[in-house]
Image: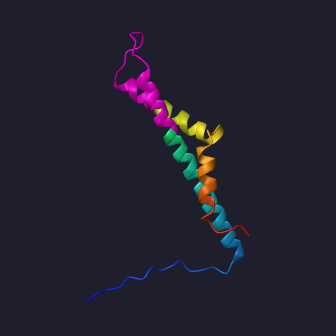
């Protein structure tokens, strides 16, 4: 016996204000996701650049220092993606925005 699964769609609302708020939330979530992706990309650039810097004897390199550097680079990447973007997030947003319902 085969059971066919039919996808269910969320119920359509007849409230235009709720639909507009939902679309605005979708756009904000998409923008945040694009910025988060850009932050991850920037952080990976920092990791690659860090590998090229030779270690010195001035500051001892241990697990605590490495963890602190990782956290600082993560926060710096997130701040850069939010404030002075390198453009990846904006381009991704423009491409994916086309798949969202049109604004009313």
**What residue occupies the far top of the structure in this picture?**
58
Tell me where residue 25 sits by quadrant.
bottom right
Q: Is 6 situated above or below 33?
A: below
Count of residue discs? 0
**What residue occupies the far left of the structure in this picture?**
1
46 horizontally vs 82: left or right = left
The way the protein has been coloured in the rendering is rainbow
Tell me where residue 55 sits by quadrant.
top left
**What residue occupies the far bottom of the structure in this picture?**
1
63 horizontally vs 38: left or right = left
The residue nearer to you, when weighing 85 against 29, is 85
Report the quarter where the C terminus lies. Answer: bottom right
Q: Is 37 situated above or below 58?
A: below
Magenta stretch containing residue 75, yes or no? no
The residue nearer to you, when weighing 15 against 84, is 84
Which residue is rendered at x = 59% and y = 47% of the image? 89
Which residue is rendered at x = 55% and y = 52% of the image? 33
31 horizontally vs 58: left or right = right
52 horizontally vs 89: left or right = left
Which residue is rendered at x = 45% and y = 79% of the image? 7
On the image, the x and y values in percent for residue 78 come to: 55, 39
The residue nearer to you, when weighing 96 against 24, is 96
On the image, the x and y values in percent for residue 54 come to: 41, 16
Which residue is rendered at x = 42% and y = 83% of the image? 6
Extent of the magenta region:
42-70
Magenta stretch containing residue 60, yes or no? yes
Report the quarter where the N terminus lies. Answer: bottom left
On the image, the x and y values in percent for residue 22 come to: 63, 67
Q: Please, what is the dominant secondary structure of the magenta stretch? A: helix
On the image, the x and y values in percent for residue 77 come to: 54, 36
């Amino acid at each position: 016996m085969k059971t066919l699964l039919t996808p269910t769609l969320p119920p359509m609302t007849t409230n235009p204000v709720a639909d507009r708020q939902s679309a605005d939330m979708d756009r904000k979530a998409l923008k945040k996701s694009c910025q988060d992706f850009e932050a991850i990309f920037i952080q990976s650039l920092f990791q690659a650049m860090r590998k090229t810097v030779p270690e010195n004897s001035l500051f001892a390199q241990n697990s605590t220092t490495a963890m602190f550097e990782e956290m600082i680079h993560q926060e710096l990447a997130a701040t850069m993606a939010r404030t002075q973007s390198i453009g990846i997030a904006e381009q991704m947003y423009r491409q994916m925005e086309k798949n969202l319902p049109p604004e009313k």
